[in-house]
Amino acid sequence: MKLGARALGLALLLIFTLCNISVSQAQSSATGSPAVARGKYLVEQVAQCGDCHTPHNDKGEPINSQSLRGASLIFKPIAPMPVWADKAPNIAGLRGWEEADAIKFFMTGIAYNDLPARPPMPQYRLSKEDATAVVAYLKSLSPAAKSAGEGK
């Protein structure tokens, strides 16, 4: 009987492992490439870009159908700041950004117009590999309709 229980345990472990490998491969192919998958992780889990760039409902919950499509910021500075951005722009698809300019932005904090990001956007100093992955992920997203003042 012990052999049967041990065999059953090993079979379940094997099935669980194979299922996880299949799910992992499916997620990687759904995102298109390892760079896109890494960029998604960095955007969603590390930098949490959606906190500002995704609209929220009245309860403060993100509206996932509008993820990274731009949003009014739900917080203000304590003291007046003339350069404070009241709205986080639509970054889905990076409409109006050349890939090289976007990578430079995430590496240096300087945009294509040679200006730094406006607060409260932190000036990230990503490695080239991470910046390339973030841009690959954002470019992989379907852009929303262009809003006034967006992009170049």
Image: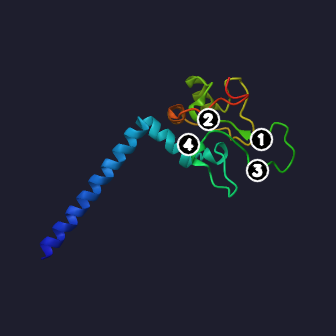
Contact between labelled residues 3 and 2, with CB atoms less than 8 Å apart: no
- Ranked by sequence position, the earlier of labels 4 and 2 is 4
Decide if residue 67 is in sight here.
no
Residue underneath mark 1: 86
What is the distance, in whole Å, between disc 1 and disc 3 at their CAs? 9 Å
Contact between labelled residues 2 and 4, with CB atoms less than 8 Å apart: no
Contact between labelled residues 1 and 2, with CB atoms less than 8 Å apart: no
Q: Front-most of 42 and 97?
A: 97
The picture quadrant where one finds residue 135 is top right
- Within 10 Å of the Cα at label 2, are there few (<14), some (14-19), or many (20+) other Cα atoms? many
- Within 10 Å of the Cα at label 3, are there few (<14), some (14-19), or many (20+) other Cα atoms? few
- Ranked by sequence position, the earlier of labels 2 and 1 is 1
What is the distance, in whole Å, between disc 4 and disc 2 at their CAs? 11 Å
What is the distance, in whole Å, between disc 2 and disc 1 at their CAs? 15 Å
- Ranked by sequence position, the earlier of labels 4 and 1 is 4
Residue underneath mark 4: 43
Q: Position of residue 75 (x, y in %)?
A: 76, 50
Residue furthest to the bottom in view is 1
How many numbered marks are there?
A: 4
- Relative to 78, is 102 on the left or the right? left
Hey, what amino acid is under mark 2? Ile
Residue underneath mark 2: 91
- Ranked by sequence position, the earlier of labels 2 and 3 is 3
Residue underneath mark 3: 75
